Amino acid sequence: MLGKLTWGAIPWDQPIPLIAGAVVFALFFAVVVWVIVKGHLPYLWHEWITSVDHKRIGVMYVMLGLVMLFRGFIDALMIRSQQALAFHAAGYLPPEHYNQVFSAHGTIMIFFAAMPLVIGLMNFAVPLQLGVRDVAFPTLNSTSFWLTATGALLVNISLVIGEFARTGWLPYPPLSETQYSPGVGVDYYDWALLISGVGTLMTGINFVTTILKIRAPGMSYLRMSMFCWTSLAANLLIVAAFPILTATLAMLTLDRYLGFHFFTNEAGGNMMMFINLIWAWGHPEVYILVLPAFGIFSEVISTFSGKPLFGYRSMVIATMFICIVSFMVWLHHFFTMGSGGDVNAVFGIATSVIAVGTGVKVYNWLFTMYGGRIRYATPMMWSVAFIVTFIIGGMTGVLLAVPPADFMLHNSLFLVAHFHNVIIGGVVFAVMAGITYWFPKAFGFRLHEGWGKAVFWLSVVGFYAVFIPLYGAGLLGMTRRLQHYDFALWRPWVLAAGFGMIFLVGSAVAQVIQLVVSYRQRELLRDELGDPWDGRSLEWATTSPPPAFNFAVLPNVSNEEPYWEMKRGAIEAQQMSAEPDYKPIEMPHNSPTGFITAFFSTITGFALIWHIWWLVGVGLVAAYAVFVWFAWRDIEEYEIPAAEVARLDRERRAPRARWLERNAAGRPA
Amino acid sequence: MSTVDAFMPSGRGRDPYRLGHGHREAHHLARGHGEGGPARKRVVVAYGFWIFLLSDIVMFSAFFAAHAVLQTATAGGPTGRDLFDPMSVALETACLLVSSFTCGMSAVATGARSQLWTQFFLAVTGVLGVAFLALEAHDFAGMIAIGAGPQRSAFLSSFFALVGCHGLHVTAGLLWLGTMMAQVFVKGFRPNILRRLLCFNLFWHVLDIIWIAIFTMVYLIGEGR
Amino acid sequence: MTGENEVLAEIGENDIAPGVTEAAGYSIREGITTYAIGFALAVLLTVASFATVKTPLIWGPGIAVMLGVLAVAQMGVHLVFFLHMTSDPDNTNNALALAFGVLIVLLVVFGSLWIMGYLHDRVMPTGDMQQRMMQMQR
């Protein structure tokens, strides 16, 4: 009846996951009960869960990402503390548990922290910057989010019911085959990623279509903001790379469930084929994460330097160059596989060449700052820290791109330090900058600057304190994923890295305090104008937070920095434009489709993991029923009357008119 | 046209850093190329679906790559030459090719707003799809019966996965087709139904294109090995 | 808006949905003709493919090349006559997306073949190794 699921699946003998799980579930239920008792459920259901508004979905993505970032961070704490203790000793995590911890850490950080954070910021900002009302397929967008949440949920369920994969964040066969991993760990990994992968793919389709087909009048390709360009490139990569991940994991699943022989030792299977295919997805994935990060920095650096982005066109070319070339370097993840000199040389050179695109970008950022009136607000500080940190990470990357050097450094902590250097220094810094930058737009008040700087300094110092020692340990030959070791030379480096974690814990605490303090002082930090940073792109042309329809009338774009242009014009003319002719606006209806789809996906995924076949059948039939039900609905849109549009737009215009009067002398902006 | 900005763009701001930025050449006012504002819903939906189909093709390419690499990994078991029946493959190909044509005919009938002919050609398309699946299932059953199932060798694993994946797509297409016929019958040619019919057409034609790659690479070249 | 208007409005808009013919005076007859020509060409190419395998006229190793050429040609026929891809500027977006997809497909398939082929030559798969060892023992 319940397949492989028995009471034995719950790890009664392991206090750490059990207590952690109990705390998480207790918190979760407490929140649910609180929501129901306080009567917030209808609000939550109508305004958030069923919302198809890109801004709400973006916020939910970021919240999911932050929660999972926290979960992944706890795994990181366990890894570093285990290694700090396990010199000539067993430490406190037994190997089978330690292996799950580092596997979960990588999986969660990439798929359920970094991806939702980046996609969340794209969701929030791209339609606003394009000057339109929503993405191309709003309901699909909601479905994407909920499928991602399904994946995250499945990974977290594995904490208390069964186990997670012990194979590392990419389940290399033959270790991940049934013969060597008979438990449900790899199955949790497979189905969580297959389901959330579908969600990510649909996001990619949605955003490619949005950026290419839905833009404000007059916004030609070369007038889009840099964040829109990098989002376009990242989403093209999603569309091209995630199907490969899906196919590869499907093959592994067929091996495990139906006895196929894609990657097995026996019957002609070829395990290297898995490594080849998974990295054909894996390398573009790196750029899916970091390209939007580049976009955020471009926006932030230009805004806070008070200058247009230097070398806009070269930036566009560099972005698209990276987009294409990122598909031609995947072998550098397995130089040591034994493919021979020719192959390794070609991919080594391609890898070095891709750094040129990034180099172009770094110079453009530097020249944007050059001669500018730089304001060091928190987002700008993250950006400057990024430039320095990312260059270090990039250089160690070019070092690893040299095949002979890679043979020495492969699988060492040097590699671990390198990719944390680019992902934390690139993606996490960008996400922090982006959240601080767009937070006032999303919620109508700024984040507390002092606590923001505390988070910044603790994170940057913590990052260097943890990962520079890991470069050292790696150069001394320490391999990754060691549960314990007895080589005295590594000991000080590992201890230093463990010590550095204290700063990162501090930054996490400061982050929570910043959110609480900002919320309590929200009246003080209120952004009434809707343009808190003296911005340049269209998202600052509307109120904070924007109305559901974003823009009362679609803006007319005539250059790369449409809002800056409008602002300059208004300051020169010293008056607001005449009130436009307001028309009623059609907006898509809320839809529970995404939530219901995710609900059945969770059930189906769980049933598949535990081989509960009847439940799989129920889930699939329900999926088809939802499809037909969704296909049959007729009224897709509701109308916001012109009077309401006018009212909201006048609310937006009033503070701006006041600002114009106050600054009639013509502040240089 | 009115603008959204509260700050009236009555003139260009003077900005010392503006040198070399912004281009003034005349833009053609094409929708969807940006200049003319958001594209029409029909274009947006079809384009989005087109992108989905390309991603689907990329997914197939991973299965094709696996099959190409594992084609010779028969592990001492039967090869393509031993197993494939050219007659059956030819029949399957014919079914799909003709169904692609009738699917196109249904699009023409939809263009003419003929409920009867649209339904007729969709039904024929569906029948041919079912025939294709039946033939394929028969082939698969025959192979499994003589011990040449996907568990036998890596070659057969990749064969069953690739061809089976295409078969699953056809199955999903048939479910969609049935739903579409019911919708056309109940709702008639509303704009949203027309958009979905367009997407279905794209889907069905692309499945046939993938089949070309399958019968060429898996069956015809595979037989030669 | 009725469906007719939406379809008509698309014409002359410099942007067109994939899978749609853009001819202004598009008639039923023209539609049928396009599909019929495409169908005839596709049948011809399919028959040629199946005949290539059987015929003794082509040098053995050339057969695979011939099949590849025929397959690419037939895909082209399907794209042009069934999916109505053209080189028209209105179709640029659709064609560019297709080109990107084709590039990725080629990279994945031929990249994998190149990498794995090289690997196969240099590192013996387990199965082969066992076989060779058995042979050597004999």
Image: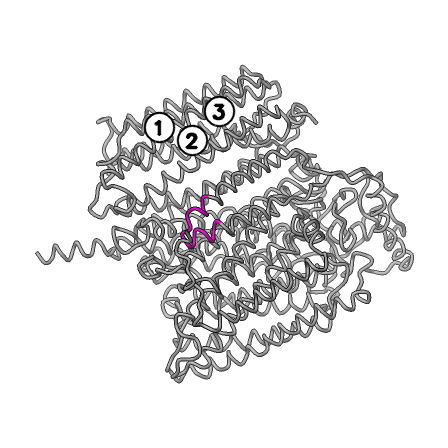
Residue C29 pos. (x, y %): 54, 14
Q: Mark 3 lies on which chain?
A: B
Question: Within the image, what quadrant is residue A303 found in?
Answer: bottom right
Which residue extends farthest front? Answer: A1
Q: Judge by depth and name the residue closer to the eye, A416 or B120.
A: B120
Left/right placement of residue A368 relative to residue A598 reads right
Label 1 sits on a secondary structure element that is: helix
Please give the residue where the numbered disc 2 appears in the rendered image.
B208
- Image-based side of A446 in relation to B124, left or right: right
Q: Which of marks 2 and 1 is in front?
A: 1
Question: Can I make out residue C59 in this image?
Answer: yes
Observer-nearest residue: A586 or A310?
Answer: A586
Q: Residue furthest top?
A: C29
- Does the CB distance between marks 2 and 1 fall below 8 Å? no
Which of the numbered marks, if any, corresponds to residue B103? 3
Say which mark, if any, is on residue B92.
Answer: 1
Residue A425 visible to an observer of this rendering:
no
Find numbered disc 2 in the image and state the secondary structure of the residue it sits on: helix
What distance separates the C-alpha of mark 2 from that of mark 1? 11 Å
| Residue A557 percent coordinates (x, y) | 74, 44
> Which amino acid, by three-letter code, is at mark 3?
Cys
Q: C89 or A106, which lies in front? A: A106
Identify the image quadrant of the C terminus of chain A. bottom right
Q: Is the magenta stretch mostly helix, strand or loop?
A: helix
Q: Is mark 3 on a helix, strand or loop?
A: helix
Colour mode? one colour
| C-alpha gap between disc 3 and disc 2 | 11 Å
Magenta segment range? A604-617
Q: Considering depth in this image, is A15 or B207 the residue closer to the camera?
A: A15
